[in-house]
Amino acid sequence: MVKKILLIGGGTGGAALFDVLHRTAHTQVEGVVDLNIKSPGCLKAKRAHIPVFTQWQKALSQLSGIDTVIEVTGDPALYENLRNELSAKPITLIPSSVASILFYLIEEKEELLNEKTKHFSKLELILNSTHDGMIAIDDEERITLINKRAEEIAGLKKEDTIGKAIHSVLPSSKLPRILKTGRVERNQRQAIYQGRAIITTRLPMKVGNHTIGALAVFKDITEIEQMAEEVTNLKSVQTMLEAIIHSSDDAISVVDEEGKGLIINPAYTRLTGLTPEEVLNKPATTDISEGESMHLQVIKTRKPVRGTRLKVGPKRKDVIVNVAPVIVDGTLKGSIGIIHDVSELETLNTELERAKQIIRTLEAKYTFEDIIGDSEEFNIAIEQAKMAATTPATILLRGESGTGKELFAHAIHNGSDRKYNKFVRVNCAAISESLLESELFGYEEGAFSGAKRGGKKGLFEEAHGGTIFLDEIGELKSETQAKLLRVLQEKEVVRVGSTKTIDIDVRVVAATNVNLEQKMNEKEFRSDLYYRLNRMPIQIPPLRARKEDIPNICQHLLTKLNQDYGRNVEGLTESGLNHLMNYNWPGNVRELENILGRAMIHMHYSQILIDTTHLPPLAMEKSSTSKQAEEKLGEESIGSLQEQMEEKEKEIIKRTLKAFSNNKTKTAEALQLSIRNLYYKMDKLNLKVIKDSE
């Protein structure tokens, strides 16, 4: 019998209880009462077309046949009023304390049912994933289980078989015999219908001594038997394989376990100029004119080799080879090599690089996850960049060449709400002044000789809705600076040869490695543009100021270089790493990547660690005596008042840094400067990390 229920209370608990009672077959929620008709329970009731009330008296008067009232508000006064009202009526009142227990019991039951359903779903998934067919019957010979593979092999459907007697569905089945004998039958061949054979194992399913059913596990051997008949003649198989190899457009070379030539195809002869007579039954080194045989290396190591460059044949053809071992039943039988003409690959690579260059100007590749560094100074720069990414402000990235300013620009774009729009990169120093204005702001048709018909969008228009990265901003000439300032102030551009303004929505990230303040004092950089750009300056420290990051940076760069050069260098030796740590890196991370790349190129392909011997000579720090001489010379020279003040300021910062063991945060606090201002002054004064010996 269905119980008709009035639910009083539509809060979180009431809503949860409503869900349970509404789904249960033996209960029917007739109405929900709550002072707030927008409570979760009331909203759910409305969606289910169940009446909602703000007064329980009205609900009781309008709803007929209510068996049970459940109070889930927890209000003692309300419960007392309900008890008085319902004491003389055949209606059961359930208080909130009992309702909560009821809810938890029902919820626990639901969870148990869900767990049971999940368990059976997993079991069914496992059974349907196996390559073996499975059919089970109960003690009355009715089918209780048939998996996907059994359906495919036997040509049956689960919905047509479950619950039916097996002899009516699969007359050839021997499972009823297992019910009678109770014995296991292993690896029995059985024809299930014409043209289809299986190998099966049948076993009884027992609970104690009582047989409750039987299970058959089987494999389809039809194709195996047919294949066995087709491959009895090994010569035909060899002929087929040779035909496949000879029809390939890729140059293929196969050698045996001793490294002697077994097979080459016509494409190999066309590429190398070597005939079968010159290669077959000859050592694998026969075709090598420069380099080492990768066949012999693979036979020795049993590991594949990819992307190795060699010169082969009498014409010393430049090729790239991929070689893999041929292993049968755990035994090495030889190796197979695929040879590619480098000239064709270089042509394709050139086209690919051209496409990549176009794409790279319109997308940002890197995120903050790609920025490697754990030093205090670098983490401050990263945190500033992350904060800046969430604002619309113009950002100025400052730092020496090679410190990763472009990497930060990519990450800022990808960390902003503009990340799904374009990221346009502009190197202000790489474009001539005569072209820069038209490239940045676009031009109209006929604006100058050679202008495209219909005109052209500028890079600011291309970046609409996204980010434009202006690298080397300090190289802009004053006329272009003035037009850039207008763009930043008015958020509009005017194409060359036009008077019409075009509204743009572009986030500007600028970068420079020059001292803009000095340029501003020398009237080479507009002060108004400087202050517009310098709203959110981020100082990226040089590599020499964060040498503790060098090991992690090296590992990251080696991963990239391995992909570029087709190598497998795993890291550096301790002496090699110490050699890098003792260098001051004027070229920063870009120089470090160059040094590692040069070392990798000169390493033997079998070496996996970069040692000091692989590294080129590095100019070490100046000796302390030369430093003292320079300092003495500096003391004797007389400069302007500003120069002398800057020298004194440099001396104070230097002394404070040393007192706090190069801790920039404590130094800034002691000098009552912001950490950003400290970095700015250190960069302006060319102040480096202080050594203990200084």
Image: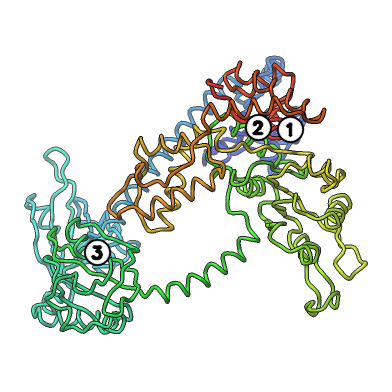
> Residue 82 falls in which quadrant of the image?
top right
The amino acid on which the numbered mark 3 sits, given as a three-letter code, is Glu
Where does the image place residue 512, in percent across and percent down from the top left? 70, 46
Marks 1/3: CA distance?
92 Å
> Residue 369 falls in which quadrant of the image?
top right
Above or below, comparing residue 65 to residue 562 in the picture: above
Q: Is residue 435 left or right of residue 195?
A: right
Say if mark 1 contacts mark 2, CB within 8 Å. yes
- First in sequence: mark 1 or mark 2? 2
Residue 6, which numbered label?
2
Which callout, 1 or 3, points to the residue nearer the camera?
Answer: 3
The amino acid on which the numbered mark 2 sits, given as a three-letter code, is Leu
User: What's the residue at 21%, 54% (across, down)?
Assistant: 137
Q: Which quadrant holds the C terminus? A: top right
Q: Nearer the viewer, residue 327 or 185?
A: 327
Marks 3/2: CA distance?
87 Å
> Mark 1 — residue?
59
User: What's the residue at 65%, 18% (across, down)?
Assistant: 656
Q: Nearer the viewer, residue 307 or 418?
A: 307
Dot 2, how many residues are within 10 Å of its Cα: few (below 14), some (14-19), or many (20+)? many
Q: Nearer the viewer, residue 342 or 172?
A: 342
The amino acid on which the numbered mark 1 sits, given as a three-letter code, is Ala
- First in sequence: mark 1 or mark 3? 1
Where does the image place residue 325, in percent across and percent down from the top left? 21, 63
User: Element type at marker 2?
Assistant: strand
Above or below, comparing residue 179 to residue 528 in the picture: below
Residue 325 in sight in this render:
yes
Residue 292, which numbered label?
3
User: What's the residue at 13%, 57% (across, down)?
Assistant: 201
Marks 1/2: CA distance?
8 Å
Where does the image place residue 413, in percent across and percent down from the top left? 67, 49
